[in-house]
Amino acid sequence: MSLKKILYGTAYYYEYLPYDRLEQDIAMMVKAHINVVRIGESTWSTYEKQDGVFDFSTLDKVLDAMHAAGIQVIVGTPTYAIPTWLAKKYPEIMVQIDGKRQPYGARQIFDITAPAYLRYAERIIRKMIRHVAQHPAVIGYQVDNETKYYGTSSDNVQRGFVQFMKDQFDGDLDALNHEFGLDYWSNRINAWEDFPSMDGTINGSLKAEFDRYRRGLVTQFLQWQVDLVSQYKQPNQFVTHNFDFEWRGYSYGIQPDVDHFAASEPLDYAGGDVYHPSRKHLTGAEISFAGDLLRTLKHDNYLIMETQAQAFKQQVPYPGQLRQLAFSHIASGANMVEYWHWHSIHNSAETYWKGILSHDFQPNPIYNEVVQTGGQLAQLSDHLVNLKAKADVAFLVSNQSLSALQNFPFSDQRNYNDVFRALYDEFYKLNIRTDITDEHHIRLDDYQLIVVPALYSVSDTFLEALNAYVKRGGHVIYTFKSGFTDEHVKVRTVQQPGIISEACGVHYELFVDPDGCQLVPQDATIDGHSDLHLQDWMELLVPDTAQVIAKYDDPNWHDYAAITKNQFGAGSTIYLGCFPSADVLRQVIQAYAQELNLLPFAATFPVIIKQGRNQLGKTVTFYFNYSSEAQTAQLVAPGQELITDTTVTAPVRLDPWGVAIVESSPKE
């Protein structure tokens, strides 16, 4: 789907205000060129104060006022935080984790499969969407909010999992016991009615399968909500959802509890919530990785449903960063940037997660920068909306491998997402655009290079497809732990890395803790003065046909390879048998990308360059300076700098935390 303009806005909570200031807020929004707000997703208890007693007067008031001001509205279904009366009437709704029912209070502490919850959620969705669907301010709907399965392991979820397994194995318990190795410690299941709760399982393979099942519950839940909303939405209205990511105080990696690729299928737009470090810690990598994933979900532009304005004290941006961040989202393919949230809240859990306005509601430096940014986005909207770009590199990510490595960790400090981000961040810093996809949705031949971080759990069929892709001319970077187990996390009974040994030209039987071991470069790929230390994991690789890039310095392991490269058919592979430093990763990736002609720009971090084609048929090149010192970037192509409306023919000078946008006619 395409939009007619860039949407720039904020989540707005009229119901949270300590006093009525709707008119003042809207006046300030208009000044800031805010043209969209999201409302309604957090206040079920306001709209249904008691069972069956509905009151949408605050919703109506906001819709009418926004429409009068020319501000469009996205309405959220209010199902991620339940009313007190519902929890009291049906206590079984509350999520059960490891056999313990969770108390009422926080959001997202209920079982999304509980029949009573679904019955009441359906009623409020139908009542609310029917009520607002004809309103001229409403352009779309957000179903639920950052949905996950919330750790649920209630009785109905356990029963559902048993049926899921029965269907998967056609009722054959012998096959299930064999596939998951359940004879171990007398875990064998001899009757379906004896299937135990997953709360106490010691079988990591079965636990990973339970996680897969629960991710499927999220997919079903969002599909159910989309189906409900679609019965009332108008042809010109869209449905989206705000996916989030693994949380480490900010958006870090692939979300363990949601299969974004499956769950996004019924949506008109993929949407996401992206939060990141700020000030001197700001790199833009979180914006980029989230954007690459969200863009790939629908192979289209996407919506940023939430991102930070002030947020917590450690995230208040330096002057210029807020503007830079908005343009960074657009450069990655976003058609909307929406802040969480408009005004800082005066009570409860998120009091100090501050919005655009502080608690005094007065204009402040953050608001003033929103005014500046909104004006520039409004001015440049025709040039920036619906940007398209093609990536030659894809990251192949895996929820199943993530779950499996949570159950069979390779480190007590790092996990799957650390491997993914270690690789992704180096591609980002080299200004190599990537897509992020999974084994079920990737179109292998669309890409020149596929990066495969820790693909620990995967089917034989897909690994054979990757081998065939390399043989016919594709290129792959594999990391340690790849190919080790099948799709049910059963360890393969062959020399590792199993099926991909053929394409990688290596095998191994032993893996060890580095224990201070370092790399020894074997060719010019890695500078001998680099940071050569290793962390967490070493596979002792035996080259068959592979060229050795690095070995280990331990005298007991010095005959083994650590990093290799192999020609296979018309293509090639890199195999990282260890977890090296960022310094080494950068050099290996840069050398391989240069060989494959995948380095599009001379610049590297802190200068970040993104490029796309706009709906006017022009090439748009974004130049970002992610540092507190001025930078100069080599001009990719002469053209018109859109923010200053000046012709550019020389290198681009970037102020600290600066941005330049050059529009050029495409090369003939």
Image (cartoon, rainbow, N blue to C red):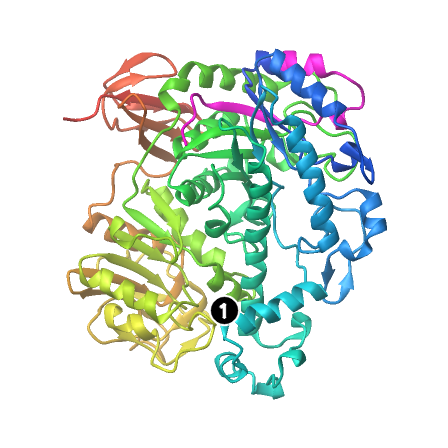
Image position of 396 with respect to 495: above or below: above
Q: Residue at x 48, y 46 (%)?
A: 264
Neighbour tally class for label 1: few under 14, some 14-19, many 20 plus, Cα within 10 Å: some
The quarter of the displayed image where residue 189 is located: bottom right
Residue 251 visible in the snapshot: yes
Residue indicated by mark 1: 410
Q: Nearer the viewer, residue 402 or 263?
A: 263
Residue located 81% across and 46% down the image: 86
Vertical placement of residue 84 versus 30, above or below: below
Could you say where residue 420 lies in the image, as x and y percent from the top left?
A: 43, 55
Residue type, numbered disc 1? Phe
Q: Is residue 303 above or below residue 89?
A: above
- Along the horizontal axis of the image, is 14 left or right of 551? right
Say whether residue 186 is magenta.
no
- Residue 440 position, x and y percent, is 39, 57
Quadrant containing the N terminus is top left
Question: What is the span of residues highlighted in magenta in the rendered image?
Answer: 1-28
Q: Tell me where residue 447 appears, x and y as whole percent.
A: 27, 49
Front-lying residue, 577 or 583: 577
Query: How many numbered discs?
Result: 1
| Image location (x, y in percent) of residue 587 | 30, 52
Give the farthest residue toward the front: 231
Image quadrant in which you'd find residue 553: bottom left
**3 part of magenta stretch:** yes
Say which quarter of the image contains residue 639: top left
| Residue 80 appears in the rendering | no
Q: Quadrant of the C terminus?
A: top left
